[in-house]
Image: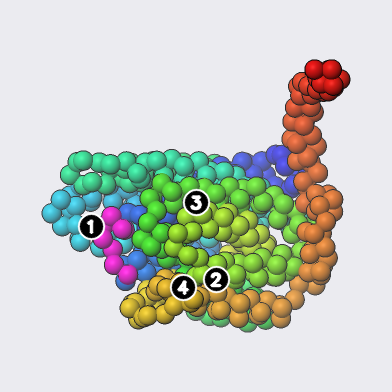
Amino acid sequence: MNVNGSCNRNMPVQVYRAALSEAGFVAAWMAVITGPFLAGFAVKLNAGTLAQGVLASLPFLATAAQLVGAYLVDVRGASRRSIARLGYTGSRLVFLAIVPLAYWLMPHHPQWLLYAFLAVTGLSALLHHLGHVAWMSWLSHSVDEEVRGSFFGARNHLASLATIVVTAFGAWAAGLQDGGATGLGGYLILFVVANVLGLLGSRAVLKAGKEPVVAEPTVTAGFFKAVGECLKQPVFRRFSTFNLLFMGAVHIASPFFVFFFLQEGEMSIRYVGLIQISLTAAAFVSTPMWGSLIDHFGSRPIQIVTLVLAALLPGIYAFTPHENIRTVALVVQTLSGTVWAGLSLSSYSWLLKISPKKNHAMYLATFGSLTGLACGVAPLLGAGLLGMVDGWNVSFGSLDMSSYRIIFLMSFALRLMAAGMVFGIPEPEARSTIDLVRALGTWRSLRSISGLDAVHSYMVAPIHRRLASRTRPLLAYSMRHRVGRALLRPGD
């Protein structure tokens, strides 16, 4: 994919460059602000189960701000650039406030620092989502429909690379031991670096050139009526309902994986960072493949396959013996990165397809807010359930089922039930899931369809040729002398 290439001939060069730059910098910011380092910081502050649930829910509850941003853009005609600049820049500056607050509160009032940390995280997330919906609306109007999978796949590919780099740095920085007044120096360094990168992402958006010309909005009513108009669209309503239930089933358990690793798995924050890197690296490698498969087969078959796989993952943790958690976590999170790369990309591509061009931002925001509501309430329910099942004496064979494991089993069952709803949502242009499974099961077909032929031609084959040219003389020499020794051996 290149600036003037076939991915999107009608997309302005400035928007293309801004989209890629923003993807990398914002992903670096998000890797810290929503990643395992928040959990690690909370553990340092002795956060209890309720605080863990609140911390996990805040970034998702904040997606309600998308509705406000979309209403301002689609109904009130506000500038996408202005909303994006306000949200992106404000969110980074707000989160930076945790650094002076840590030095002020940690020595004498550590519990207050935990409350301040939760407040800063929530406000920063609100501002980020306010700006994010304006920027996504800008991009959705700039990308041709037939190449959305490839474009957003390339964008996510770059975001995954940035996440890997920042997570590696974060795992090192968070593990630093600070003997100063706070004892949190490594985390504070990480927060400063992440927010500087986030501000560079905000700067990239400002260089995107002119906003796209969009048809006049058809929704001119009040805020709640505008949301209701979106939900009257049958396919959009069914897709939003399914996604709300499935993501609720996911987030009743997934925010507690890191706490499970740190506490029951007795892992260091650096090992948790390594696990996160493996997850992101898997997403980085697989995202271009998923993008090409979506363009070839449609979003629905990708959703079905990845939904089933994503439903199984928490069940694996539930039955993993204590002594194997470290190894299993590394393998499962790597698989999870591959699965969720396809699930997230196909979900967003399908959403763009079923959302009308007019009032596009309002549809995206309604979907994002409903998803955020589910993802925000579910961790609170999970925290409440953890408190309820704590102390239960449940065993499975020789394995004692801790409260975390019981929640993981609940998530496994709920995910499977919610995933069945996707079969009732149509996508007329999509091919069958059987066709996709056949392609995934045949290497030659998969390589051709997914674009891996290009990877093989331009990366694997040249490396193979170089290695062959270097090793062939050594092999020939080895064979000559092996034959010589075989001939001499009878007379020895």
Residue to which mark 1 is pinned: 113
Amino acid on which the number 2 mark rests in the picture: Gly
Quadrant of the image containing the N terminus = top right
Does label 3 or label 4 sit earlier along the sequence? 3
Residue to which mark 2 is pinned: 315
- Tag 1: Cα neighbours inside 10 Å, few (<14), some, or many (≥20)? many
- Please give the name of the residue rendered at 85% of the width and 21% of the height, measured from the top-left corner: 490
Does label 2 or label 3 sit earlier along the sequence? 3
Q: Which residues are magenta?
A: 42-49
Is 97 placed left or right of 394 in the picture? left
Is 132 placed left or right of 184 in the picture? right
Report if residue 46 lies within the magenta region.
yes
- Image coordinates of residue 207 in percent, x first then y, are 54, 41
Does label 2 or label 1 sit earlier along the sequence? 1
Does label 2 or label 4 sit earlier along the sequence? 2
Dot 2: element: helix
Amino acid on which the number 4 mark rests in the picture: Ser
Amino acid on which the number 3 mark rests in the picture: Ile
> Contact (CB < 8 A) between labels 3 and 4?
no
CA distance for labels 2 and 4 = 17 Å
- Image coordinates of residue 130 in percent, x first then y, are 46, 60
Amino acid on which the number 1 mark rests in the picture: Leu
* Above or below, 380 relative to 191: below
> Contact (CB < 8 A) between labels 1 and 3?
no
Report if residue 460 lies within the magenta region.
no
- Number of the label disc, if any, that sits on residue 275: 3
CA distance for labels 2 and 1 = 35 Å
Residue that protrudes farthest toward the left in the picture: 108
Q: For marks 3 and 4, give the one nearer the viewer.
A: 4
- Tag 3: Cα neighbours inside 10 Å, few (<14), some, or many (≥20)? many
